[in-house]
Amino acid sequence: MNETEKREFQEELLRLRERVCQALARRVNETPQEVFDEADLGNTTLSMELEVSSRRQLTETLEMIEKALRRIEAGTYDTCEICRRKIPLERLRAIPYASLCVECQERQERAKK
Ligand SMILES: [Zn+2]
């Protein structure tokens, strides 16, 4: 990943953080929603995802965005946290706050269930 790409992802993450913060602010006076089944990120856009997210999911997303921004600073943004392989750019374009490659992510989700 070169400096230009880094900056692009950084800007994208900052924009995303702004949107998540706004979505959170709108939900302050709402009763907690049912937690939606985690939609397949491949089939839906991130903005749609945000609209249907619960407060808990939004807070988690915000944390992941903050973490991704720190990972950009540290130069480990496109490195999978578990297996240390490169996360493909197209995955990061779809989910800019992903910190795991697809394989590790799937393994973790299976382990959670
Ligand atoms: Zn991995």
Image (cartoon, rainbow, N blue to C red):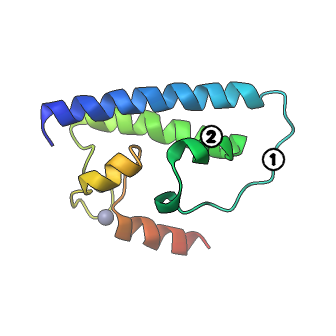
Q: Which mark is residue 99?
A: none
Residue at label 1?
33
Q: Which mark is residue 58?
A: 2
Task: Give me the residue at 21% from left, 38% from top.
Answer: 75
Residue 73 in view, yes or no: no
Q: Is residue 61 above or below residue 104?
A: above
Label 1 lies in ligand 1 vicinity (Cβ under 8 Å): no
From the top left corner, tell me how far across and down residue 39 is, in percent.
60, 60
Residue type (three-letter) at the residue carrying disc 1: Gln
- Which quadrant is the N terminus positioned in? top left
Mark 1 crowdedness (10 Å alpha carbons): few <14, some 14-19, many ≥20: few
Number of marks in picture:
2
Furthest residue to the left?
Answer: 2
- For this view, does 59 lie left or right of residue 55? left
- For this view, does 61 lie left or right of residue 54? left
> In which quadrant of the rendered view does residue 85 lie?
bottom left
Mark 2 crowdedness (10 Å alpha carbons): few <14, some 14-19, many ≥20: many
- For this view, does 79 lie left or right of residue 14? left
Marks 2/1: CA distance? 12 Å
From the top left corner, tell me how far across and down residue 33 is, in percent.
81, 47
Task: Give me the residue at 82% from left, 43% from top.
Answer: 32
From the top left corner, tell me how far across and down residue 82 is, in percent.
33, 61
Task: Give me the residue at 62% from left, 40% from top.
Answer: 58
From the top left corner, tell me how far across and down residue 109 is, in percent.
52, 68
Q: Is residue 81 above or below residue 76?
A: below
Residue type (three-letter) at the residue carrying disc 2: Leu
> In which quadrant of the rendered view does residue 97 lie?
top left
Ligand 1 position by quadrant: bottom left
- SS for callout 2: helix
Furthest residue to the right?
Answer: 31
- SS for callout 1: loop
